[in-house]
Image: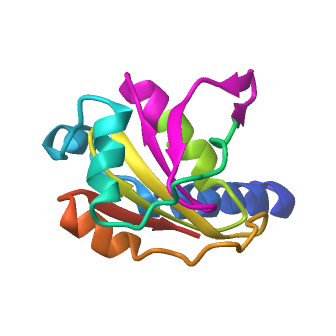
């Protein structure tokens, strides 16, 4: 018989895992999503649908247990950023790190890119209006996910 403390810990971990998997999809689902040739082409596609800032701030620095994660990204607004990836592993790693933020994070996800809106994250500056990420995903034939 398991102790109450150990059972509670396992249930807590399962709850966290299930919560993160709200945004999970089948492993081969990325293959059917749209892709872009570069960060610039992804930025152009998003920029046709979203009013991106001309003088957007610097890209977000993403850290994991090993330190700074290499990312290729550009901010569209203060809280909306476009990420482009050379590998599925890099995309999944960055997605997981951003999804762990305290608050609601919204993604429009393609096969080798995603747009993330972290305007409802605790550390957000709140300096720009949130965008309709669900509509953006629909317009780009991408997958919309929301992680709380």
Residue 30 located within the stretch drawn in magenta = no
Q: Farthest residue toward the front?
A: 54
Point out the stretch of residues depicted in magenta: 62-91
Q: Is residue 66 magenta?
A: yes
- List x then y, in percent, for residue 3: 83, 57
Is 78 placed left or right of 22 in the picture? right
Q: Quadrant of the C terminus?
A: bottom right
Compared to residue 59, the image places residue 104 above or below, namely below
Q: Is residue 39 above or below residue 122?
A: above
Q: Residue at x 56, y 44 (%)?
A: 96
Q: Can residue 112 be seen from the camera position used here?
A: no
Location of the N terminus (image quadrant): bottom right
Q: Position of residue 108 (x, y in %)?
A: 36, 58
Q: Position of residue 137 (x, y in %)?
A: 28, 64
Q: Is residue 70 above or below residue 126?
A: above
The residue positioned 46% from the left and 74% from the top of the image is: 131
């Amino acid at each position: 018989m398991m102790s109450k403390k150990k059972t509670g810990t396992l249930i807590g971990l399962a709850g966290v895992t299930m919560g993160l998997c709200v945004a999970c999809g089948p492993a081969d689902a990325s293959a059917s999503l749209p892709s872009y040739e570069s960060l610039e082409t992804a930025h152009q596609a998003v920029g046709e649908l979203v009013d991106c800032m001309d003088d957007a701030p610097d890209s977000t620095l993403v850290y994991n247990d090993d330190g700074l994660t290499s990312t290729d990204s550009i901010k569209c607004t203060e809280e909306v950023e476009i990420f482009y990836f050379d590998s599925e592993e890099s995309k999944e790693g960055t997605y997981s790190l951003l999804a762990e933020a305290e608050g609601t994070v919204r993604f429009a996800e393609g096969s080798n890119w995603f747009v993330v809106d972290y305007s409802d994250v605790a550390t957000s500056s709140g300096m720009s209006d949130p965008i309709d990420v669900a509509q953006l995903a629909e317009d780009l034939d991408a997958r919309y996910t929301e992680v709380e």
